[in-house]
C-alpha cells in the first residue's frame, strides 16, 4: 500500500521549513520532526516501579546493557538507539549536551553523571551497536507510583507532556497485575496522546509472568489465562491494544545465556529428583546448600540471580526432556518466556504501521507549533494540514480503531470485532487483517478480502445503519479495497 | 487459663467486699464480662497478590483461605479456635428471627444469618472465582480450627486485597480495621514498598496504630535481604518500631509436610509467631491485666475512703469536726463536677457542636468536589451509553469521601474526649471508647442511582422523527411546485422532504443529548443530596452518641466519687455518736475490712507487673476498649482523685 500519510507529512514539513526559514526556534522544531519522521519508530517502556521495565528492555535489545537492581533503579529517562560505536550523551535541561564515559560493570552500563544532579538531566541517550535497535528506538522510563516523588514525576512529564506531542510513538506498558494506578495512568495517557492524535497506541504487558504462579512450572500458563482475562477487561480494553504475558528475567537471560549456565543446569538435571526439589525450595536454600558436586555457591548464586527459580526449574525440565545444546535451550526458554509473542505483537501492531504512527506524530507536532505561531503564517499551512488529517486513510484507520475500542459505533459486537480486525487492530498485514494464516496464498487473501468487501458493502447500504457506523463502514471498505489493490493482479 | 481464673477470683473477691455500693458492683460486673470474652483480632491487610491468604494458611497450617494465581479473596475470612474444624458464612438475614446471632464478629452485625458450609467448599463462597464480585452477597466467612496458636483467643482475619480496580475492597478493609487489635501488613519481596502501599499503610495506621509488617515470598526472590533493608527504611519514616518479618509461606507448608524443624526456622515463621504471641496476644493480656488491676484499685480506693474516715472518727473523736469539714469541701468539689455548669461539660457541649458543624462542612465540601467533577464529565460526552460505569465511579468516589470524613471525625472525637478529660481532673482519667469510624452500613439507606435510558432509538422511532420533519417539506414544496402544474409528490418536493427530515432528525438528536445531559446532572445532584442527607444524619447521630457516652462516662466517675465522699461524711458523723463499747468493736471490724481491702489492692497492684511464666499461651485477654460491643460499657481505668 502506498503511504499518502508519510509522503504528505514530509511534504508538509518541507513547506513548513520554507515558511519558517527566518524563525530559528521554529525551524529547529521542524527539523526535529523531520528527523523523527525519518528515524526509527520510538517505543517507550513504561510501568509502575519495579515492574521489570529495564529487564524487558534488555531482553528486547538482546544484551544486558540497561542497569537493573533489586531496589528502584532507573531514575532518568534513557533512550537506547542504534549507533555504530557505543556512546552515552547526557542532555541536561539547561545547557549543551555532554558526552559521558562508556563504562560497564558486569556487562551493564554505569551512568556516571559526574557533578550533574539527576534532577537536572532531561534524558540520557545511549547509542549502541545492536541489530535489534536498527529499526526501533527504545526509551526506558522511571517507574510511576514510586516512593520518591520526583522520579515518578519525571516519568509522567515525559510520557504525558502537557503542551507538546509525546516524544514516543508508541508505549509498551508493563504491569504485574492490573493495579488501580495502572488504569489511572493509562487513562491519562489516552486523554493526552490519543486526544490529540486519535488512536490507541499502547500495548500492555503482564510482566514478571514467572512469578504469578509462585515460580511453579506451570506459572506461564496461568499468566496466559490472566492476561486473556485482562485483555477482555472493560477497563483496559479502551486503553491498550492487547495484553501479552512475558517473563522478563527469563527472556533477558535466555538471550544472554552462556555455556557455563547450560553446564550448571545440566548438573542440576542429573541430580536425583527428590533431592533437587528439596534443594530448590527457596532461593536462599539453593545458594546455601552444599552440592551438587561441581557447582559452587557462587555459580549457584549467579544462576539464581540470572534465571530465577522458575527459569532454573524450566531449564532443568527442558534438559531432562531431551534438549542437549545451549542454543536450543536458549531458544526454547526465549519462546516460553513470551518474548517472541511480544516481539510479534510489536512488529504487527507498531512496526507495520510505523510510518503512519510517525507521520501522525509529525502532524501533531506541527499543529502544536502552528498554535503558537503568528496567524498569517499559520494560515498558509493549516489548510494543508487539515486536508492531510482528514484525507489520509491511515489516520482514519487509526482513528476508527480508537473509536471502536473506546465508544463503539452501534454495530453488533461481532461486526465491531471484525471491523477492528480489518482496519488493523491485530496487526496491519493483509493476512492478519483478514484473520488468515500468515502463510496464506494470494488467492486466499484476495478471495477473503473480496467477500469481506461485499459483506460490508451490504451493511453500508442498509438504510437502517446509523450515520456514525456508516462512516466506519466506508473506512473498512476502503481498507478492503486497499488490500485488494495491493495484490498483484491475480484473477 | 489459670490467669483468667486468678483475675476472676480477685474480681469476685472485690464484689464480695463492695457490699451495698451498687455503682461499684456494676463496674466490677463489667470487668468480669470483659474477662469472659477472650478474643484478639489480628487483621491481615495489604495489596492484592501479596500472599495474604497463603500467610494465614501457613500460620495455621491448613488450606483454609483459597489461594489462586489470579485475584483470589473477595470476602473477609475469620479464622479462630474451635473444635472440630468447621466453617460458616455470614449472609444478610431475610427474616429478622435469625436464631444464632453473634455480635462479636465485626461489631453491630445484627440481622446476619449463619450458614454452615463444608470446609472444603469454602472457596466457592469466598474466592473471586467461585463468587465473582461477591454476587452471593456474603458478608464474611468464619473458620474454626483446633490449633495451639489460636488457643489464646487469637483470631486472624483475611481481608480482600486493596489497590485493585474494585476500590470497594479498600473500603471493606478500612471498615474492618476499628474492631481489630492489631494489623499485619503484607507485601512481597519482589520489590520495595510502592507509593500506594505506603499511602494505604498511613491511612490504616490512623485507625489501627498497632501494626506489624510481613515481607512474604522470600523463597522466590534471592535479593529479599536488600528489599527488607529498603522496606525497613521506609517504615522508619512512617513510625518508629514497626517490626518487619521476612517469611516464606511455601517453606513453612513444606516444613509441615516434611516435619522438618530446620526448614520451619528457615521460613521465618517462628519469629512472626513469637511476636504474635508475646507482643500481640501478650500485649492484649497485659492491657487486660492492667485494666482489671485499675478497676480493682479504684474500687478499693473508694471503699477505703469510707472506712478510713470512719476509723479516724472513731479513734480520734476530737478531730472529727475538722475531718468532716474537709470531707464536705471535697464533696462539694465532686458535686460541682456533676453539675451541668462544670467546665468539662461546657467543653464537651461546645466541642460536639463545633465538631458537627465541621463535619457537615467537610462532608459537603468533599461531595461537592465530586459533583463538580461528575458534571464536567457529563458535559464532555453522552452520558447515556456509559451510565453504568459512570454510576459505579460515582458510588465509589462518594463511598471513599464518606469514609475519609468518618476517619477524620473519629480522630476529632477522640481528641475532644482527651480535652474533656483534661478539664475533668488533674489526674489521669480513662477515656471512654468511641467508635465513629466504622462506616459499615452508613451508605445503606442511600437509594441506588436511578437508571437512565442510553439514548438509543429503534429504527421505527428514527423513521417517525424523520417523517415528522419531512412531512412539512414535502407538503410545502409539493404545494409550491403544484403551482407550476406538478404533482404533489414530485422529485423536488421529495428532495426537500428528505433534507428537512434529516435536519429535523439531527436537531432532535442534539436536543435529546442535551436532555440526557441535564437528566444525568439532575440524577447526580439527587444522589449527592441523598448522601449528604442520610450520611449527615448518621454522622450526627453517632456524634450525639459520642457526646452521651462521654458525658455518662465522666458523670459516673464523678458520681462514684461523690457517693464515696458522702458515705465517708455519714460514717464519720455516725462514729462521733457511737458509744465506747461499740466503738472498740467497730474499730476492730473496720480494721478487718480495711485489711481485706488492702490485700485486694495489693493483689491488684501486682497484676500488671508479673506475667506468670506458665501462662504465656493461655492468657485469655481482651484488650483495647474499641472491641467491647457498646461504647458506654467501657469505663475501665479510673483513678479517683482522693479527697
Image (cartoon, coloured by chain):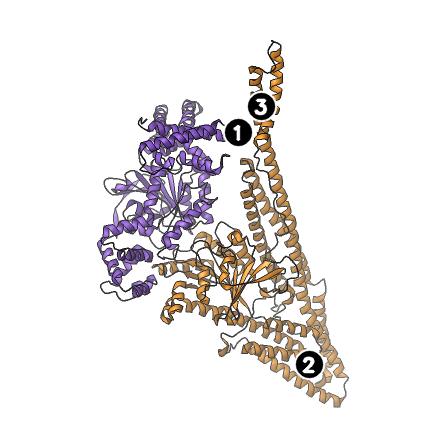
Chain colours: A purple, B orange
Answer yes or no: are tags 2 and 1 on the same subunit.
Answer: no
The residue pinned by badge 3 equals: B501
Q: Position of residue A287 (x, y in %)?
A: 30, 63
Answer yes or no: are tags 1 and 3 on the same subunit.
Answer: no
For label 1, the SS is: loop
Q: Is residue B532 left or right of residue B210?
A: right
Q: Position of residue B200 (x, y in %)?
A: 49, 55
Indicate whether B62 appears above or below B391: below
Please give the label number shown on residue A464. Answer: 1
Instruction: Decide which of tag 3 and tag 2 comes sooner along the chain.
Output: 2
Split into 4 quadrants, where in the image is the C terminus of chain B?
bottom right
Q: Residues within 10 Å of mark 1 (few under 14, many from 20)?
A: some
Whether residue A32 is visible: no
User: Going 56% across and 52% down the picture, which residue do you hit?
Assistant: B404
Q: Position of residue A129 (x, y in %)?
A: 24, 42
Disc 1 to disc 3, how far (Cα)? 15 Å
Q: Position of residue A134 (x, y in %)?
A: 27, 39
Amino acid at each position: 500500500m502506498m503511504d499518502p500519510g508519510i509522503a504528505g507529512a514530509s511534504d508538509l514539513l518541507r513547506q513548513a521549513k520554507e515558511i519558517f526559514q527566518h524563525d530559528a526556534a521554529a525551524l529547529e522544531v521542524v527539523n526535529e520532526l523531520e528527523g523523527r519522521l525519518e528515524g526509527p519508530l520510538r517505543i517507550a517502556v513504561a510501568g509502575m516501579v519495579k515492574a521489570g521495565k529495564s529487564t524487558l528492555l534488555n531482553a528486547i535489545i538482546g544484551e544486558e546493557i540497561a542497569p537493573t537492581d533489586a531496589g528502584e533503579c532507573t531514575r532518568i529517562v534513557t533512550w537506547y538507539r542504534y549507533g555504530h560505536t557505543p556512546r552515552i550523551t547526557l542532555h541536561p535541561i539547561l545547557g549543551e549536551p555532554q558526552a559521558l564515559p562508556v563504562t560497564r560493570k558486569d556487562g551493564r552500563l554505569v551512568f556516571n553523571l559526574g557533578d550533574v544532579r539527576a534532577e537536572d538531566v532531561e534524558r540520557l541517550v545511549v547509542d549502541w551497536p545492536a541489530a535489534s535497535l536498527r529499526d526501533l528506538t527504545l526509551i526506558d522510563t522511571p517507574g510511576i507510583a514510586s516512593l520518591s516523588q520526583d522520579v515518578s514525576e519525571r516519568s509522567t512529564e515525559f510520557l504525558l507532556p502537557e503542551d507538546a506531542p509525546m516524544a514516543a510513538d508508541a508505549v509498551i506498558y508493563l504491569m504485574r497485575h492490573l493495579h488501580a494506578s495502572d488504569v489511572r495512568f493509562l487513562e491519562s495517557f489516552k486523554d493526552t496522546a490519543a486526544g490529540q492524535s486519535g488512536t490507541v497506541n499502547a500495548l500492555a504487558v503482564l510482566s514478571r509472568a514467572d512469578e504469578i504462579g509462585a515460580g511453579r512450572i506451570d506459572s506461564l500458563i496461568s499468566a496466559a489465562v490472566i492476561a486473556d482475562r485482562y485483555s477482555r477487561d472493560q477497563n483496559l480494553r479502551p486503553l491498550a491494544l492487547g495484553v501479552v504475558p512475558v517473563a522478563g528475567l527469563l527472556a533477558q537471560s535466555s538471550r544472554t545465556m552462556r555455556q557455563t549456565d547450560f553446564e550448571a543446569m545440566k548438573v542440576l538435571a542429573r541430580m536425583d529428583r527428590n533431592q533437587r526439589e528439596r534443594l530448590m525450595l527457596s532461593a536462599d536454600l539453593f545458594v546455601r546448600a552444599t552440592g551438587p558436586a561441581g557447582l559452587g555457591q557462587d555459580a549457584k548464586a549467579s544462576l539464581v540471580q540470572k534465571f530465577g527459580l522458575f527459569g532454573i526449574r524450566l531449564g532443568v525440565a527442558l534438559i531432562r526432556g531431551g534438549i542437549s545444546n545451549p542454543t536450543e535451550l536458549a531458544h526454547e526458554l526465549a519462546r516460553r518466556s513470551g518474548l517472541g509473542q511480544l516481539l510479534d505483537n510489536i512488529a504487527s501492531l507498531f512496526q507495520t504501521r510505523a510510518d503512519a504512527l510517525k507521520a501522525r506524530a509529525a502532524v501533531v507536532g506541527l499543529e502544536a507549533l502552528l498554535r503558537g505561531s503568528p496567524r498569517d503564517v499559520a494560515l498558509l499551512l493549516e489548510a494543508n494540514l487539515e486536508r492531510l488529517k482528514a484525507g489520509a486513510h491511515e489516520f482514519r484507520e487509526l482513528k476508527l480503531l480508537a473509536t471502536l475500542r473506546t465508544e463503539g459505533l452501534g454495530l453488533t459486537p461481532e461486526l465491531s470485532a471484525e471491523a477492528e480486525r480489518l482496519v488493523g487492530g491485530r496487526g496491519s498485514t493483509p493476512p492478519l487483517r483478514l484473520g488468515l494464516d500468515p502463510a496464506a496464498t494470494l488467492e486466499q487473501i484476495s478471495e477473503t478480502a473480496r467477500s469481506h468487501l461485499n459483506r460490508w458493502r451490504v451493511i453500508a447500504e442498509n438504510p437502517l445503519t446509523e450515520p456514525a457506523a456508516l462512516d466506519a463502514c466506508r473506512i473498512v471498505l476502503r481498507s478492503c479495497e486497499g488490500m485488494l489493490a495491493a495484490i498483484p493482479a491475480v484473477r | 487459663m489459670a490467669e483468667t481464673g486468678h483475675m476472676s477470683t480477685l474480681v469476685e473477691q472485690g464484689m464480695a467486699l463492695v457490699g451495698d455500693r451498687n455503682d461499684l458492683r456494676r463496674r466490677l460486673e463489667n470487668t468480669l464480662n470483659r474477662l469472659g470474652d477472650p478474643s484478639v483480632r489480628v487483621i491481615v491487610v495489604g495489596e492484592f497478590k501479596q500472599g495474604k491468604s497463603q500467610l494465614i494458611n501457613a500460620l495455621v497450617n491448613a488450606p483454609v483461605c483459597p489461594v489462586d494465581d489470579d485475584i483470589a479473596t473477595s470476602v473477609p475470612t475469620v479464622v479462630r479456635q474451635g473444635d472440630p474444624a468447621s466453617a460458616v458464612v455470614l449472609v444478610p438475614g431475610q427474616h429478622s428471627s435469625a436464631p444464632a446471632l453473634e455480635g462479636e464478629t465485626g461489631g453491630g452485625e445484627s440481622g446476619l444469618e449463619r450458614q454452615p458450609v463444608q470446609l472444603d467448599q469454602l472457596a466457592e463462597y469466598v474466592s473471586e472465582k467461585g463468587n465473582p464480585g461477591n454476587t452471593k452477597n456474603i458478608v464474611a466467612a468464619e473458620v474454626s480450627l483446633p490449633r495451639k496458636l489460636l488457643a489464646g483467643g487469637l483470631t486472624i482475619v483475611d481481608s480482600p486485597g486493596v489497590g485493585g480496580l474494585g476500590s470497594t475492597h479498600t473500603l471493606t478493609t478500612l471498615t474492618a480495621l476499628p474492631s481489630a487489635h492489631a494489623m499485619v501488613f503484607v507485601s512481597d519481596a519482589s520489590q520495595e514498598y510502592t507509593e500506594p502501599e505506603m499511602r494505604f499503610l498511613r491511612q490504616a495506621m490512623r485507625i489501627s496504630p498497632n501494626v506489624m509488617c510481613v515481607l512474604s515470598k522470600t523463597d522466590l526472590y534471592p535479593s529479599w535481604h536488600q528489599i527488607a533493608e529498603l522496606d525497613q527504611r521506609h517504615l522508619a519514616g512512617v513510625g518508629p518500631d514497626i517490626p518487619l518479618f521476612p517469611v516464606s509461606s511455601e517453606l513453612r507448608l513444606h516444613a509441615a509436610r516434611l516435619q522438618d524443624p530446620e526448614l520451619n526456622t528457615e521460613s521465618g515463621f517462628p519469629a512472626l509467631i513469637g511476636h504474635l504471641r508475646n507482643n500481640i496476644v501478650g500485649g492484649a493480656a497485659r492491657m487486660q491485666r492492667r485494666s482489671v488491676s485499675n478497676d480493682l484499685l479504684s474500687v478499693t480506693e473508694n471503699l477505703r475512703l469510707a472506712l478510713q474516715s470512719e476509723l479516724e472518727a472513731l479513734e480520734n473523736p476530737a478531730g472529727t469536726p475538722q475531718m468532716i469539714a474537709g470531707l464536705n469541701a471535697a464533696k462539694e468539689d465532686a458535686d460541682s463536677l456533676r453539675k451541668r455548669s462544670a467546665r468539662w461539660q461546657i467543653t464537651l457541649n461546645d466541642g460536639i457542636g463545633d465538631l458537627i458543624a465541621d463535619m457537615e462542612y467537610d462532608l459537603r465540601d468533599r461531595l461537592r468536589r465530586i459533583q463538580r467533577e461528575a458534571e464536567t464529565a457529563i458535559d464532555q460526552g453522552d452520558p447515556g451509553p456509559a451510565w453504568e460505569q459512570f454510576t459505579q465511579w460515582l458510588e465509589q468516589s462518594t463511598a471513599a469521601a464518606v469514609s475519609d470524613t468518618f476517619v477524620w471525625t473519629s480522630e476529632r472525637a477522640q481528641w475532644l474526649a482527651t480535652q474533656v478529660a483534661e478539664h475533668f481532673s488533674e489526674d489521669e482519667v480513662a477515656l471512654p471508647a468511641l467508635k465513629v469510624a466504622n462506616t459499615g452500613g452508613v451508605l445503606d439507606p442511600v437509594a441506588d442511582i436511578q437508571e437512565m435510558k442510553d439514548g438509543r432509538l429503534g429504527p421505527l422511532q428514527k423513521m417517525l422523527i424523520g417523517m415528522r420533519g419531512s412531512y412539512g417539506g414535502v407538503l410545502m414544496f409539493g404545494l409550491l411546485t403544484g403551482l407550476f402544474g406538478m404533482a404533489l409528490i414530485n422529485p423536488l418536493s421529495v428532495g426537500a422532504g428528505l433534507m428537512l427530515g434529516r435536519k429535523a432528525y439531527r436537531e432532535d438528536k442534539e436536543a435529546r443529548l442535551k436532555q440526557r445531559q441535564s437528566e444525568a446532572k439532575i440524577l447526580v445532584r439527587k444522589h449527592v443530596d441523598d448522601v449528604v442527607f442520610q450520611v449527615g444524619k448518621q454522622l450526627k447521630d453517632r456524634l450525639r452518641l459520642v457526646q452521651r457516652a462521654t458525658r455518662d462516662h465522666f458523670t459516673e466517675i464523678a458520681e462514684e466519687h461523690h457517693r464515696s465522699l458522702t458515705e465517708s461524711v455519714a460514717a464519720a458523723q455516725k462514729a462521733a455518736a457511737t458509744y465506747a463499747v461499740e466503738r472498740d468493736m467497730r474499730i476492730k471490724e473496720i480494721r478487718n475490712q480495711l485489711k481485706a481491702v488492702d490485700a485486694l489492692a495489693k493483689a491488684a497492684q501486682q497484676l500488671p507487673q508479673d506475667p506468670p511464666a506458665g501462662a504465656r499461651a493461655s492468657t485469655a485477654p481482651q484488650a483495647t476498649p474499641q472491641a467491647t460491643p457498646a461504647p458506654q460499657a467501657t469505663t475501665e481505668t479510673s483513678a479517683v482523685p482522693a479527697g
